[in-house]
Structures are given as structure tokens and as C-alpha cells.
Amino acid sequence: MGETPESPPFPLLKLPYVVLNNVISNFKQREILEFSFVSKKCSSIIKTSNLFRFEIRISFAKDLPVVSFTPPGKFTLGNCHIAEDYFEKRENYIRDIVDMNKWSGDVDEKNLQLSLTWADYIFDLYHLNNIAGIYLSSNFSLNKVNTIVEWLNRRIPYPMNFFFNGSETNEDGLELFFDRLKVNMRTLSLQLTVVKDLKPFIRRILDLDRFEAYGKSFTYPIKWITMDYILSSTFKSIYMRYTSFTEMDFNRFIKSWLNGNHSRLESFYADVQQMNRDLVIDGIEVEKRDDNVKRVFTA
């Protein structure tokens, strides 16, 4: 059998603007990015089309960024996920945008600058004006924290969701991040699965729509978030795994709530070990449930 002849190249860029826009609107997220690399004209076409409505989540926890694109409000692991190996293989495209020779010779510093340059490129390309989440390591060095905070303060003008994760934690780095960050937080998630005890922190961050904290286990529970911190907050939603809260802690919280505090609070979930119910409600008037009484609620 003879070889199948190659199809002639298709002059995509010679299509009328409206037709070209219709073609591009059917591109998948990764295809959009690849198309922008072809030439400056292709990149310009993508930017001017403004056809894409994705949410983006970007992680700086590794050497190079990890980016997830999703339809608004539909985040699943099956959505487009661009990992660090993708950006590593396309480093030559960044060389056309910035002079990498001016960057520090330190590998970690260079990787961070490369990550932020990629992030800027993606944000500009997709006209992103709403980022669904920023994911960071809890063990960044102070220099890395400074660089990221400066970039966030320059780049993000709206409330943001921040997610920290790590089995090791640089407490000074976290405090520096919270001290210098000017971006308002909508959600703060701290998944610090550390074995050592951490001193209480984030005391300045009290007004959030959602606060999440994760310990490693009940053997190594959360001790770095105290009930005093919860009582001083105005969170709308609280979710905590593996806490060290006691009966007295929840007794204080319930009394505070009954006295009219925490008016914004809609939900509070906390993993606790078995508790003495009588100690939890000590000093609180409780109406005993009568199973013989039927209460019917209609909307």
C-alpha cells in the first residue's frame, strides 16, 4: 500500500475574523495555550477574542506552576490540569518574553520567577479577572514568601481563596505572608499535617467567608488554632479536622453564640474525640426533646 499523502496546510489565520473566532471558541484550554505559542499574532488573536470563561486555580507549591482550568463553579479533578512538566518543556517560549539571564543564579529563585512569569502570561492570555484559588506551600523560605507576596499584591485586586499545604511548616514564613499580604482573603485553608507543635498564629485574619484547618491525626491534632481565636472571629463557615478542643471550649463557644455573637456564622464543623455531653452544656438551659411531639415545618 502506498503512503497516505499529507494534507496541505490550512491557512487558519486567513479566515475572516468572525469565522476564526468561532473556530477558536471550540479549542480546549490546553489547545488555546498551544495556539498562543505559534506566533505573536496568534497570541494577540487569543487575547482579543475574549471568548473564554474559565475559573483558574494555580499552585506554586512545586518548582513550576500547576494550573487547573474549570468551568465556573464546576471544579473536579477531571477538568483540564496542566502540570509542571508541561511548562518545563516549553521554557523556550518564555525566553521570548523575558530576559532570563537577568534572573538569579539560584535554582529555587529562578524557578519561582519562571512560575510567576508563566502565571502572568496565562492571566493576560485568558483575560482572567477572577482566580478561584492560589495554592502555596507552608514551608516556603522567607525570600520566596517576600517574592510571592509582592506579586500577589501587584496582581490580585479582589478577595482571594488561599490554600496552604505541607507536612513541614515555616512559621516565620507564614507570619510574614499574613503580615505583608494586602489582598483580602475570602477563604483560608491550612492543611498543616505537622508532627511538631506550632505556636498560635494568623491572629490578624479574623473576617473570612470560610476558614479551614486540618491536623494530621488525633495523635497530632490542631493546637495552633485556639478557641480564643475562633471566639474573636467573624467567620461565616468553619471546617476543622482533628482538633484538640475540649468540652470547656465548646461550652464557651455555645454560650458566646447564645449571647448573640457570631451572627455571620452559618456552619461550624470540627472533628473531636469523644466528649462528655454534660460538660459541653454545663450552665446552658436545654429544652429536652419530646419524641411524642411532632413538629411540622412548611416552606
Image (cartoon, rainbow, N blue to C red):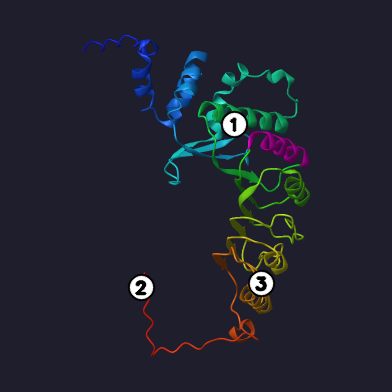
Mark 1, Cα crowd under 10 Å, few <14 / some 14-19 / many 20+, is some
Secondary structure at numbered mark 2: loop
| Image coordinates for residue 263, horizontal then vertical, percent | 60, 66
Give me the C-alpha separation between circle 2 and circle 1.
50 Å
Which residue is at 52% across, 87% downward? 287
Question: Which-is-in-front pick, marks 3 and 2?
Answer: 2
> Which comes before the other along the chain, label 3 or label 2?
3
Q: Quadrant of the C terminus?
A: bottom left
Q: Main secondary structure of the magenta part?
A: helix
Count of numbered circles on the image: 3
| Image coordinates for residue 10, horizontal then vertical, percent | 34, 12
Asked whether the residues under the numbered discs 3 and 1 touch, taking CB atoms below 8 Å apart as contact, a structural biologist would say: no
In this picture, residue 157 sits left or right of residue 83: right
Asked whether the residues under the numbered discs 2 and 1 touch, taking CB atoms below 8 Å apart as contact, a structural biologist would say: no
Q: Is residue 185 depicted above or below 246 in this figure?
A: above
> Which comes before the other along the chain, label 3 or label 1?
1
Q: Nearer the viewer, residue 37 or 64?
A: 37
Which residue is at 63% across, 27% downward? 117
Q: Nearer the viewer, residue 298 or 155?
A: 298
Q: Is residue 226 depicted above or below 190 in this figure?
A: below
Secondary structure at numbered mark 1: helix
* Residue under pointer 2: 298
Query: Please, what is the three-letter code of the amino acid marked with disc 1?
Result: Ala
Which residue is the extreme one toward the left? 1
Magenta range: 142-156
| Image coordinates for residue 110, horizontal then vertical, percent | 70, 28
Q: Nearer the viewer, residue 126 or 223?
A: 126
